[in-house]
Every structure is written in structure tokens, then in C-alpha cells.
Amino acid sequence: MPNLASIAFTLQRDSKDPLFVQLCDQIRQRIVSGWLLQNSQLPPSRRLATDLGISRSTVVTAYEQLVAEGYIEGRTGAGFYVRELADLDPQDSARNAAPSSPISSSIPDATPALHPGYPDNRLFPYRQWTRCLARTARLTPEALIVGKSPFGDLPLRQSIAAYLADWRGLDIQPEQVMITAGSVDALENCIRSLAMPGDVIGLENPCYRPLRNIAANQGMRIEWLSVDAEGAEIPSESRRTATPKMVILTPSHQFPLGGAMPVNRRLEYQQWANANDAWIIEDDYDGEFRYAGRPIPALASLDTSGRTIYIGTFSKVFAVSLRLGYLIMPPPLIARFADTLAKFGVKAALPCQRALANFIDSGDFYRHIRRVRRIYAERRRLLLDLLQQKMSHFVALQDHQAGMQVTVTLAPGLDDREICAAAGARGLLAAPLSSYYGAGEASHGLLLGFCPYSEDEIRDYVAVLSELLEARQRRVQSLQSVF
């Protein structure tokens, strides 16, 4: 097993990307390429920090991000281990070779290439954000370190309430807003507040992979909800031993398949929750990125009985490294969530909250959303056009006009895990669709991100992916001719 500290990292202190992002990206690449074996232990954060000459908090933040993405897992009292992703060919030569160089010299270091869900840091409004930070430090320096509520900075909660009223159709009060350390923290707080170990929880199949870890860590039993053209199906009465205590849904843009849940299915879920004294957790992870018209009103905007908790994040639309999100709870649940925070502690960092409130109130946040949505729409259209031109005989896709990734299904005989492993050996990371399924027969496909990449980068990446698919298709045809 390779020693992680002995692998040559390239951490550039003058890079626009924070050190923890660089470290996270490079560890991720080594996992996907097979250089770091599944179930292998990562070095303690303190030791790796010493070896690399960086702060321990930088290593911890990188590890936490990889846990959230599902690449590694923390084991109580034993440290961090590479998860069993089951998408690497054990005979792949990448296991016995150093990590590959980028796929061509014309492609810049933009790892993870085509990996879904990442914003483009080159579009970040650095100057406007710096002004808000400086203004906060000058006018209200105490807001950087002194918090008055476990639910977060009140001005930020007020700004979020106003933003959601305008963009998502939610009529809420600031008291209903809780600032979290991203969407994973919000989901954990929902499960801790609204369910008990042993309760049944309904998850979409397929779904966001870290959800499985969250449910398992909280002792939940999972009822997998099949996804059809209208989103997750209503929990089944016929095959159940216990009614789900809650369901976690992505109705505005189902992850990872795409598509929006129509109003009839949304109303059915509201009726189901009312009839079964259950809760709906609406994970609106990228609701801002709809490329035809305005964002769809949130499912929570239809809730008249207080059964829906809404979750949002700033990681997709603003900055991953900010590590801030929020949840919106019905007023009767405020005391219950406050009790959860008292028991398990507050994870959301305080220093940037007041500056973010100023950034939203100034209008810069809205201008940033409109700008990146326009640019992402252009990159998305290019990716779709290239997929049709170069890969239509390998993949099928549906244009849902939303999101930060395009999901394609593969032609019969093509294994998405094998293709992703081969792509990883070329320095190009794509996510296998089959790995997002928790039960039943999984569809084979690829999740292709496009937001962080220029048009030239997207063209180069698609060319390499097309080459790999052609090689795999020839291999499949050759084996079929033999048998």
C-alpha cells in the first residue's frame, strides 16, 4: 500500500485555489485512478500536515470534503479510510503506476475533469467579496467572532429569508432559518431532530451517495424509492413493514438523473406526509441553475401543514470552501432543532456569515448568480452538442435544462465503472451512474460536469472520453464475436 505522505503532491501557495482544495483534488485523483487502494488507511491529519508543511486544519478540511463526497470514510477511533467505490478494475495497471499526468498538454490542471457539481472558481467575484469582508471587519468586527444565536447570524438569516421569497417562492421568517456547515450538516440535523435509530427513512434510488452514510451512521433503515419520469415514487404501502418517518427528495432537479417533479406528484407527497405524520426533506442543492425561465418554486412553497423542511447550500452557487448552507424549518420545529444543536453542537463557521449577508443585500450575489448561470448555460449547450456529435452511438441523454452536470446512459454492454476507471488513468474523472443506486438493478451511465471548464477544455475532455468509449465498444464487440 502506498504511503500517502510519500506521494509527490504539488501544493502551490500562490494558487487561486486554497491549499485544502488542492490537497482534496489530488487525493481524490489518486483514489479514482487506483493509486490509493480501497480500504487503505489515510495518515493521521497531524502527521500529513507535518510532512507537507501545512496546517492540520487544512488536512482536516480536505478529509471532511472527501467524506462528504463519499470517497473516504471516518471510522470511530481508527481514522480515515478509502471507501469501497467498486469502480476500479483490480487488474488495471494504474494500481501499480504513479498517478497519470493530465490527458494532454493542451488541457490545464482542472481536476476533477468533468466531475459533477463543482463551480468555476475563475468566475468567483473576488473583489466584491473582499469589499464585503473588509466592510464587515471595519464596521462590525465583533460579528466575525461573536455569535448571538446557535441558528447563525441574524442578518444572514434575514437575507436568506428575503432571497428565498424572491427566488424560491417561500414565505418564511428569519427565525425559521438555521445556518449550517453545508447540506450534509443540514441533513444530519434533520435526521437527528426528526427520527430515532431504527426508524425507516425513504431515499431516492438513485440518490446522493453520502446520504447512505448519513442514514447508516444515524441507525436508519432505508426504503428505496424508485425514480420515474416524475421523480421519486410515493412510498409503497404494499411492501412495507413500517412507514417511513421521513423522505429526502430532490424535486427541483433529481440527483443524479435530472428532471423536475411535477406539481401533482409534489401534492401527493404533501398528502402522504399529512396522512402518515411524516416529514419531507427537500434538498434543493442546485435550484438556482435552471436554464429555461426562472427557478421552479420549491416543494416547500406548497406546504400548508408544516411537514416540509427545506435545505439549500452556497457551495454550488457561490463557493465550496465557504462551507455554508441553511435549512428552513416550520415554526413548531424551532425548539426541537435548537435542542439538537444543544446536544451535538454548531458546525457552521461564523466569520463569513455577516459578510455573506452584506454580499446578498448589496445585490452582488444576485448579479453573480445571473452571470454564472449565463456562462454555465453556454458550456452546457456545448457539452450537449459535442455529445450528440461525437458520442450519440455510445450514449443517450435527456435535456432537462437544469443543473451542474449532464447525465447520460450508456449503450448496452458498456460498464460505467470500467469506463470511469480507464478515464481516471488518463486524468479525466467522470462519475459512474451505477454507483448512485442503493438497491435493485442499476442503470449504467456517466455524470459529466461542465461548470468549471472553458469551451476548449470541454472539447478536449469529450474527445478523450469519446476515444475511450470507442475502445471499450471495440473490446465488447470483439468478445461477442468470440462467443
Image (cartoon, helix red, strand yellow):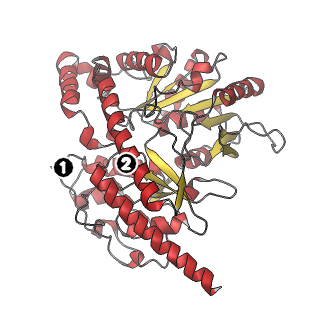
- Residue 56's tag is none
Q: Image quadrant for the C terminus? A: bottom right
Q: Residue at x 61, y 25 (%)?
A: 308
Classed neighbour count for the residue bearing mark 2: other residues with Cα under 10 Å, few (<14), some (14–19), many (≥20)? some
User: Which residue is at the far right?
Assistant: 238
- Residue 15's tag is 1
Image spot of residue 416 (x, y percent): 53, 64
User: Which residue is at the far bottom?
Assistant: 482
Please name the amino acid that badge 2 sits on. Leu
Numbered disc 2: secondary structure: helix
Closer to us: 68 or 43: 68
Q: Image quadrant for the N terminus? A: bottom left
Q: Quadrant of residue 130?
A: top left
- Above or below residue 162? Residue 29 is below
The answer to whether residue 111 of the structure is visible from this angle is: no
Determine which residue is flagged by label 2: 382
Image spot of residue 33 (x, y percent): 40, 68
- Above or below residue 216? Residue 191 is above
